[in-house]
Image (spheres, rainbow, N blue to C red):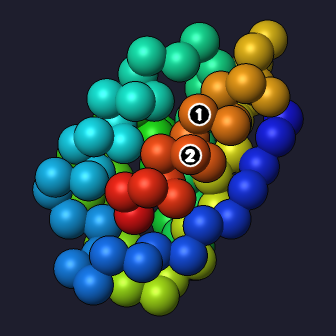
């Protein structure tokens, strides 16, 4: 398992558009993706679940990537987060 932490930089938080794009990116990956914010944990490939997190500007999001291609998949997600969240 590989994990990283990302601080939400979008002033609107993890709203519908970036959450949808994140879920679409995660769905293309072979690895499983789990997102943690505070005491909430969701499947990173499920848009509705991500929307329930209510991630706000400045909050830390921990993303776990697990699978045969976890190193490369984690890099894809880190790049996505740095550019979009």
Q: Quadrant of residue 9?
A: bottom left
| Image quadrant containing the N terminus | top right
At which x and y percent is residue 25? 40, 30
**Residue furthest out toward the front:** 83
Residue at disc 2, secondary structure: helix
Q: Which residue is mark 1?
A: 76
| Image quadrant containing the C terminus | bottom left
Q: Residue at x 36, y 42 (%)?
A: 22
At which x and y percent is residue 35? 54, 52
**Residue furthest out toward the left:** 16
State the mark number for residue 49.
Answer: none
Q: Relative to residue 38, is residue 25 drawn left or right?
A: left
At which x and y percent is residue 18? 26, 53
Q: Residue at x 69, y 45 (%)?
A: 64
State whether residue 53 appears in this view: no
Q: Which residue is mark 2?
A: 79
State whether residue 81 appears in this view: yes
Q: Relative to residue 25, is residue 18 drawn left or right?
A: left
Tag 2 and tag 1, C-beta contact below 8 Å: yes
Residue at disc 1, secondary structure: helix
At which x and y percent is residue 26? 45, 30
Crowd class of label 2 (few under 14; some 14 to 19; many from 20; radius 10 Å)? few
Crowd class of label 1 (few under 14; some 14 to 19; many from 20; radius 10 Å)? some
- Real-space Cα separation, disc 2 to disc 1, in angstroms: 5 Å
Give the answer, above or below, for where 7 lies relative to 21.
below
Q: How many marks?
A: 2
Q: Quadrant of residue 54?
A: bottom left
């Amino acid at each position: 398992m590989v994990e990283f932490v990302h601080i939400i930089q979008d002033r609107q938080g993890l709203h519908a558009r970036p959450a949808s794009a994140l879920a679409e990116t995660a769905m293309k990956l072979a690895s499983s993706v789990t997102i943690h914010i505070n005491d909430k944990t969701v499947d990173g490939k499920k848009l509705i679940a991500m929307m329930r997190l209510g991630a706000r500007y400045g909050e830390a999001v921990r993303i776990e990537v697990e699978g045969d291609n976890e190193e490369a998949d984690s890099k894809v997600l880190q790049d996505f987060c740095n550019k979009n969240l």
